[in-house]
Amino acid sequence: MEHTERRRDIKQLTREDLARALSDLKQPAFRTKQLISWLYEKHAHSFDEMTNLPAALREKLAERYTLNIPAEVARQVSKDGSRKYLLELADGVTVETVGMPRRNKLSVCISTQAGCGMGCAFCATGMGGFVRSLTSGEMYDQVMHVAEDFGTRPTSVVFMGQGEPFANYRETLAALRWLNAEDGAGIGARHLTVSTCGVIPGIRAFAEEPEQFTLAISLHSAIQETRNKLMPGVKKYTLLRLREALDQYIEKTGRRPTYEFALIGGVNDTNPEMDALVDFCAGTLAHVNIIQLNRVKNSLLEPSTPEKAAELVRRLNAHGVEATIRNSRGNDIDAACGQLKQRVINPHNA
């Protein structure tokens, strides 16, 4: 009986793998460039679309590889123009992705994992638990899905959806590089932002990468006891060690990390919490993004007040720390920070 190997997702092949695969099929070297263009620049949905490849080659590729494109299960449009998508991957797992247009720009927020194992108290994704990590191709395809729906090229991508990117470091980095590549999405490295809960080995590795990708840290408290309660998944990465890693990151790269701080009423908007945040940030290059907590179903946490947010900005500015209040996009369709999870919503029953 003939043994049939399981076909591999072609987007899991590196440039070198693709070149080797085509060489094995006795193809000239220029075919690699053509294939990459179809996979990433033109984002072909099938091998049949690759019209400048010989028909025989397309058949051989289809025999050996799959070309998986996520299927849209649900789509919601916010009053601010943001769109949230529930996308189904090849194995039936679903993830959420958000497109956020503003003037002539389009920002895309993508997921790096289905579910998340960090268990943050303010995040809907963590409440659902961890399902699996995504491949670089599945991350790239989220961006392309949004681009195709809006009919325009994305100008920035934030890895701030479901999952902890540095718990899936290799695939996240591969996705970043394809999004940055001239023969990929062609998005500037500084417009590609990775948000981590503070996974220190990932921060140290990220500092060694040659590209100027942007780093954001979900901080949410500079008091260890509070942070442990809010973010139990990173308890072992203490604030002292996190600050050391970030100092080394800044020294190594010269780049400014962003601290994300979701302001929660009665939890991290008190005087001691504000003082601790000022102490943590003072004397560093960091920029603090203050976000009013977005409400999450079944969570007892409540947003703080606009007055508290303004006070925190004043305190940070007084100590030479740049800080801004970020307006959440898409919270009327549960598409804002901390609200993403894998569920289908009937808009008529929402």
Image (tube, helix red, strand yellow):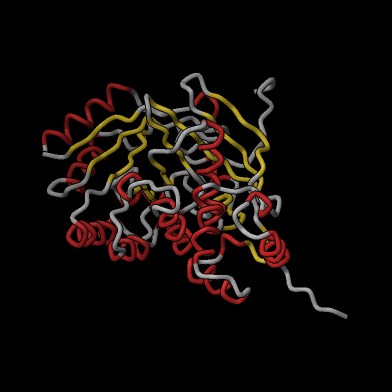
Residue occupying image coordinates x 60% and y 57%: 132
- Judge whether 250 appears above or below 4 on screen: above
Which quadrant would the C terminus be assigned to in this image?
A: top right
Viewer-side residue, 229 vs 335: 335
Q: Is residue 218 visible?
A: no
- Judge whether 40 appears above or below 32 on screen: above
Which quadrant would the N terminus be assigned to in this image?
A: bottom right
Q: Horizontal placement of 59 versus 219: left or right?
A: right
Q: Quadrant of residue 108?
A: top left
Q: Position of residue 180 (x, y in %)?
A: 38, 52
Residue occupying image coordinates x 33% and y 39%: 261
Q: Position of residue 91 (x, y in %)?
A: 70, 54
Viewer-side residue, 37 vs 252: 37
Q: Is residue 210 visible?
A: yes
Q: Horizontal placement of 150 versus 87: left or right?
A: left
Q: Horizontal placement of 183 versus 45: left or right?
A: left
Q: Residue furthest bottom?
A: 1
- Judge whether 149 appears above or below 350 on screen: below
Viewer-side residue, 239 vs 320: 320
Q: How many marks?
A: 0
Q: Position of residue 258 (x, y in %)?
A: 28, 45
Viewer-side residue, 42 vs 307: 42
Residue occupying image coordinates x 62% and y 38%: 86
Q: Position of residue 81 (x, y in %)?
A: 48, 23
Residue occupying image coordinates x 28% and y 26%: 308
